[in-house]
């Protein structure tokens, strides 16, 4: 890197560090990004590298699977310290800890991994996060001060995993059992506004969409999919959806009047066409009578771009037509990874910590870049923010610059 370019990069990072503001279109304020679709608005990054991009920082924060929420020059994620699940606020430029606050006692799970599963949600100067044991915390994004909390005790076998959905004035969580499969709280006070369906939850984050002018929320429960009215919690549709060990973890995708679902463990995927049925909704599987095993998303949610689903599922990296379920291409050896989309490119972060970047095309995936960024178990979706890629494994978070060569 030339000295002039290095100075320009450093100056740019300094300016970013001065900004403290509400979330904007370029921020990544919650699970799956600004529009809940795994797609970034970033355009100024470099997709082709012949060496590992510059690492700006790496920081040990302890076990967790939480994603990295980036807003106003700060990174919010979770880890483990002092035998507690911790919510961290890090400087996006340096990785320095601005503050950390305990969520609840540590969560130990030897089969998959320890720590918080949910990703922090930023909204209007507040951070919301659900601990794996069931404490929902709302705190001030600037100071970390607790504002309110709630406790739920309907956690599934491997801990609460769904992130908090902010829908208007509501904070919506998948709580489960007597609390309600989906619960909506006043986002400012924590008071319950509505709750629906006393059934066990899965591991997915509630997902919002608009159908026929009505705002709806869908939740992947333990054995079924639940669609409710976003303002009242009124139940509109249930779709039976069973999986071994009740692991329904991937996020649904709504597109063109149709709802995509996927799970692993031999269950598969389907696209359901929604229709009005009196004051309810009906759902018809367009991919066949049973779920198709073309995509087995154990916890991986695909990215939908130009009518095609891109995902690194249990079997490999693949592209599947949304409308038909037809597989366009598949690459073995890149299984259980995560994928985001930006400026026509796929950014694939493998389970082993390798970054691959290539054009998003239904014809093939030809990586322009392959770079080893981390080691260990890497199941967390990366975040692209201001030309930098934020990644983590089970215990460490790191930041790589994709703009300065």
Image: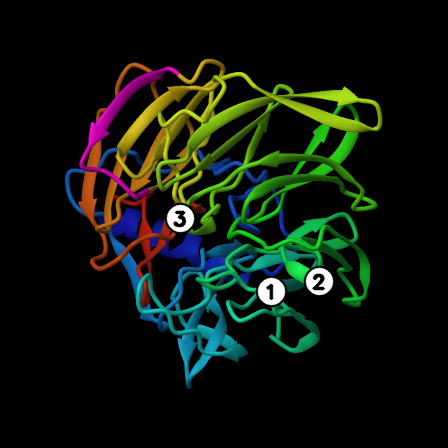
- Comparing 351 with 157, the one in front is 157
Q: Earlier in the sequence, mark 3 or mark 1?
A: 1
Q: Which of marks 3 and 2 is nearer the N terminus?
A: 2
Image quadrant of residue 320?
top left
Residue 207 appears left or right of 124: left
Secondary structure found at label 1: loop
Q: The C terminus appears in which quarter of the rendering?
A: top left
**Residue bounds of the magenta highlight:** 326-337
Q: Name the residue under label 2.
A: 179
Tag 2–tag 1 contact (CB < 8 Å): yes
Color scheme of the displayed model: rainbow
Q: Is residue 369 above or below residue 203?
A: above
- Comparing 17 with 147, the one in front is 147
Q: Mark 3 points at which residue?
A: 381
Residue mark closest to the camera, 3 vs 1: 1
Secondary structure found at label 3: loop
C-alpha separation, residue under disc 2 versus residue under disc 1:
8 Å
Q: Where is residue 389 in the image (x, y as percent from the top left)?
A: 36, 49
Q: Position of residue 19 (x, y in %)?
A: 57, 59
Residue 154 badge: 1
Residue 72 appears left or right of 380: right
Secondary structure found at label 2: helix
C-alpha separation, residue under disc 3 versus residue under disc 2:
29 Å
Residue 321 appears left or right of 350: right
C-alpha separation, residue under disc 3 versus residue under disc 1:
26 Å
Q: Position of residue 111 (x, y in %)?
A: 31, 64
Residue 356 appears in the rendering: yes
Q: Where is residue 128 in the image (x, y as percent from the top left)?
A: 62, 63
């Amino acid at each position: 890197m030339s000295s002039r370019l290095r100075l320009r990069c450093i100056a740019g990072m300094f300016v970013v560090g001065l900004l403290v503001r509400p979330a904007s279109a370029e921020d990544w304020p919650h699970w799956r990004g600004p529009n809940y679709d795994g797609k970034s608005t970033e355009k100024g990054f470099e997709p082709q590298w012949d060496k590992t991009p510059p690492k700006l920082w790496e920081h040990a924060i302890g076990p967790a699977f939480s994603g990295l929420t980036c807003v106003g020059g700060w990174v919010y994620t979770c880890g483990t310290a002092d035998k507690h699940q911790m919510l961290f606020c890090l400087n996006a430029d340096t990785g320095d800890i601005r503050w950390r606050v305990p969520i609840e006692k540590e969560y130990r799970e030897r089969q998959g991994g320890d720590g918080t599963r949910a990703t922090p949600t930023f909204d209007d100067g507040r951070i919301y996060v659900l601990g794996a044991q069931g404490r929902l915390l709302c705190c001030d994004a600037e100071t970390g001060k607790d504002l309110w909390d709630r406790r739920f005790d309907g956690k599934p076998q491997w801990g609460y995993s769904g992130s908090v959905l902010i829908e208007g004035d509501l904070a919506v969580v998948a709580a489960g059992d007597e609390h309600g499969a989906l619960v909506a709280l006043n986002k400012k006070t924590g008071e319950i506004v509505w709750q629906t369906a006393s059934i066990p939850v899965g591991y997915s984050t509630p997902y919002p969409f608009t159908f026929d002018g009505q705002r709806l929320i869908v939740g992947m429960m333990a054995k079924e999919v639940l669609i409710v009215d976003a303002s009242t919690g009124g139940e509109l549709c249930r779709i039976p959806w069973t999986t071994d060990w009740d692991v329904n973890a991937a996020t649904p995708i709504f597109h063109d009047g149709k709802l995509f679902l996927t799970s692993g463990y031999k269950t598969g995927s389907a696209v359901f066409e929604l229709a009005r049925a009196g004051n309810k909704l009906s759902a018809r599987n367009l991919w066949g009578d049973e779920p198709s095993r073309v995509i087995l998303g154990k916890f991986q949610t695909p990215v939908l771009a130009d009518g095609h689903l891109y995902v690194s599922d249990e079997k490999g990296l693949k592209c599947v037509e949304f409308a038909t379920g037809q597989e366009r291409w598949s690459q073995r050896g890149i299984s259980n990874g995560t994928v985001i989309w930006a400026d026509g490119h796929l950014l694939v972060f493998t389970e082993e910590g390798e970054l691959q970047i290539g054009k998003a095309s239904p014809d093939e995936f030809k990586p322009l870049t392959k770079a080893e960024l981390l080691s260990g178990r890497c199941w967390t979706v990366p975040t692209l923010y201001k030309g930098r890629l934020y990644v983590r494994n089970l215990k460490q978070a790191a930041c790589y610059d994709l703009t300065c060569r």
